[in-house]
Image (cartoon, rainbow, N blue to C red):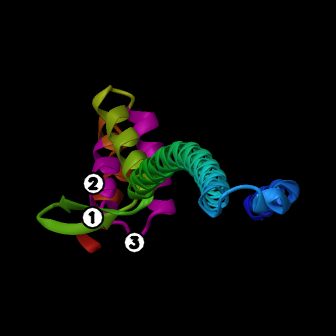
Amino acid sequence: MHTAFKLKSVTVAALLAATAFLPLTARAGLFDDDEARKAILDIRSKIEALQRDVANKADKNSVLTLSDRNDNLQSQIAALRGQIEVLTNDIANAQQRQKDFYVDLDARLRKLEPQQVNVDGQTVAVGIPEQQAYDAALSQFKGGDYKGAANAFADFIKRYPQSGYAASAQYWQGNSLYAQRDYKGAIAAQQNVVKN
């Protein structure tokens, strides 16, 4: 729109210049027709040159405007690419943290789930607390604390009567009582082993 205004201004200026030469054309009678034609052609060529000059300036301005817009868009694209890289990195880190969380959670749950163990030739499911109680009682027996072992095995049998280790706990309870010279208790515990 600005270019069209300049073009009109130049055209008006050219017309004013042409009208300024009108008094000269009144004297044209004094001059030759060829000279008048030359003057008109000269004025036309000047007007056309001015119009071309204005058009070239308008083209240069539009090219500069497009170039500025292009540079602006390029900088915006670069900024967006940077943001995309940051977000991609954030997503990758979040996914890795989530994976690590699930692996950790799975490992913790596996510790709480019953484990398949082989007890006296049979495969049975044994919970972690159950396994720990049995192992603690057996460690007391192996450490020579027969009274503590007998109590620990008795407690184990009460807490886990359906355990795969129940018969073995009764057997070791009997051995603990035998080591304390409680033969009646040992015989009763061993009979429970045979009975169960």
Tell me: 177 left or right of 56: left
Is residue 164 in view? Answer: yes
Q: Which residue is mark 3?
A: 162
Residue type, mark 3 in image:
Gln
Mark positioned earlier in the residue sequence (2 or 3)? 3
Q: Which residue is mark 1?
A: 193
Q: How far apart are the alpha carbons under marks 1 and 2?
A: 6 Å
In reply to whether residue 163 is colored magenta, the answer given is yes
Q: Please name the residue shown 56% across and 50% down the image.
A: 63
Looking at the image, which residue sits at the far top? 143
Query: Residue 173, image x and y in percent?
Result: 35, 49
Q: Which residue is mark 2?
A: 171
Q: Toward the viewer: 52 or 126?
A: 52
Tell me: 50 left or right of 184: right
Say if 162 sits above or below 68 in the image.
below
Q: How far apart are the alpha carbons under marks 1 and 3?
A: 13 Å
Query: Residue 168, image x and y in percent?
Result: 27, 56
Residue type, mark 2 in image:
Tyr
> Are the residues tagged 1 and 2 within 8 Å (C-beta)?
yes
Stretch in magenta: 146-175
The answer to which image quadrant residue 190 occupies is bottom left
**Callout 1 environment at 10 Å: few (<14), some (14 to 19), or many (20+)?**
some
Query: Residue 116, image x and y in percent?
Result: 25, 63
Q: Toward the viewer: 149 or 187?
A: 149
**Callout 2 environment at 10 Å: few (<14), some (14 to 19), or many (20+)?**
some
Is residue 180 in view? Answer: no
Q: Toward the viewer: 123 or 101?
A: 101
**Element type at marker 2?**
helix
**Element type at marker 1?**
helix
Mark positioned earlier in the residue sequence (1 or 2)? 2
**Callout 3 environment at 10 Å: few (<14), some (14 to 19), or many (20+)?**
few
